[in-house]
Amino acid sequence: MSLRITVLGRGAWGGTLLRLWERQGHELRSWSRRDGGDPAALLQDCDLVVVAVSMVGVTPLGLGLRGHWPQGLPLLSCSKGIDLDSLCTASQLWRRHLPALPLAVLSGPNLAEELERGLPAASVLSSDDPALARRLQEQLRTPHLRLYTNADPIGTEAAGALKNVIALAAGISDGLGLGANAKASLLCRGLAEIAVVLQALGGQPTTLYGLAGLGDLLATANSSLSRNYRFGSLLAEGCDEATALARIGATVEGPRTARATLALAVREGWQLPICGQVVRLLAGELEARQAVQELMQRDLRAEAAA
Ligand SMILES: NC(=O)C1=CN([C@@H]2O[C@H](COP(=O)(O)OP(=O)(O)OC[C@H]3O[C@@H](n4cnc5c(N)ncnc54)[C@H](OP(=O)(O)O)[C@@H]3O)[C@@H](O)[C@H]2O)C=CC1
Ligand SMILES: O=C(CO)COP(=O)(O)O
C-alpha cells in the first residue's frame, strides 16, 4: 500500500530515507530548515511524518508544530542523541510537545551512504504501540532495508544515542594506533556503559544486544563513513572540538550526547568512565593519550560493574 509520507529534515539521513521510500512507490513530500517556510503546512493529507533533523532541531520543530498536529497522525523519529538542554531523547521531547502522538522510533546500523548505494541493511522500528510498529514495518521495508520491531523505544533510543559516544572513542583509539586489543576492550567496556544508561532509563537488556545497540555500535565504531568515528580520529590527531566539527561539516551527535549523558550520570550517580574521559578531552582538560592512560589505571573491579 502506497503511503503519503512527509519527511522533516532533508540532511544525509532524511534525504536517503526519502529517496529509498520514493523508489518503493510511496508519495513523498519534505521540508528542511534551509527551505524556510512552515513545516506545519505539510501535515495535512498525509499518513506518516518522518523526522530526521539533528537533536538540536527537535525542540524548535516541536514548538513550531504544536497546535497543528492532526489527531492520530503518526510520527517516526529518526534522530539519535540526548538533548543537552533537556537531557531527553528525541521521543521524550516529542511526547512533551505532542502528548497524544502515535510515536515510533527507527534506529539501527544504517550508515546513510551505504543505503544510498543500495547495500543491504537492517533496522528496528520501535514503539509502545505494537500494532503501529508492525504496520510501519510492513509498509516501510524495502528490498535493501529489512525492518524488525521491538516494544522498547526508550532502550532503542538510549542505545542509538550512546553508541555515538563510544564510536567517537573508537575513532580516537584507532587514530592513536592502539590496535585491535584496545579497540575490542573499548567496545566491550563501552557496551557496559551503554547498558548502565539503557537500564536506568527503563530500556530492555535485549535491546542492548540488538540492531540498535551492538549492531549500530559495530557499524559506527568500525567505519570511516561514520561522522562520530571520524570526529574521534581528528581528536586523536590533535584537533580541538571546533576544528574537528568544521572539518566534518555535518551533524556529529556524539559530543553533545556525551555531555548530556555525563550530566545525567552526575545527577543519577552512574559510573561512566569512557563517557567522562570523552567529555574531559572535548573540554581540553587532557590529551587523548592521557585519557587512555587514566582509563587503564582506574581502580580494578569486577567485569559486571561499569
Ligand atoms: N547520516 C546517517 O547515516 C544517519 C543519521 N542518523 C541521525 O539522523 C539525524 C540527522 O542526521 P543527518 O541527516 O545525517 O545530519 P545532516 O547534518 O546531514 O542534516 C541535519 C539535518 O538536521 C536539520 N537541522 C539541524 N539543526 C536544525 C534546527 N535547529 N532546526 C531544524 N532543523 C535542523 C538540518 O537542516 P538544514 O540542513 O536544512 O539546515 C538537516 O536537515 C541525527 O540525529 C543522526 O544521528 C540516524 C541514522 C543514520
Ligand atoms: O547513526 C549512524 C549509523 O547508524 C550514523 O552515524 P554517524 O552520525 O556517526 O555518521
Image (tube, helix red, strand yellow):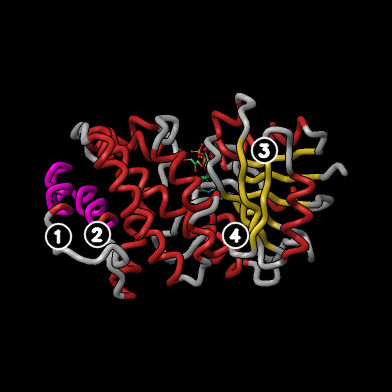
Residue tagged 1: 298
User: Is residue 279 shown left or right of residue 218?
Assistant: left
| Element at label 4 | helix
| Element at label 3 | strand
Which residue is pictured at 33% across the width and 30% down the height? 247
Asked whether mark 4 lies closer than 8 Å to ligand 1, one says: no
The part of the chain drawn in magenta is 275-295
Tag 4 near tag 1, CB within 8 Å:
no
Rounded to the nearest whole Å, what is the CA distance between mark 2 and mark 1? 9 Å
Rounded to the nearest whole Å, what is the CA distance between mark 3 and mark 1? 42 Å
Q: Earlier in the sequence, mark 3 or mark 1?
A: 3
Which residue is pictured at 26% across the width and 54% down the height? 274
Q: Nearer the viewer, residue 273 or 48?
A: 273
Rounded to the nearest whole Å, what is the CA distance between mark 4 and mark 3? 28 Å
Residue tagged 3: 145
Name which residue type carries label 3.
Answer: Leu
The label nearer to you, 4 versus 3, is 3
The crowding category of the residue bearing disc 4, from other C-alpha atoms within 10 Å (few below 14, some 14 to 19, many at least 20), is: some
* Residue 267 visible in the current orientation: yes
The answer to whether residue 90 is above or below residue 223 is below
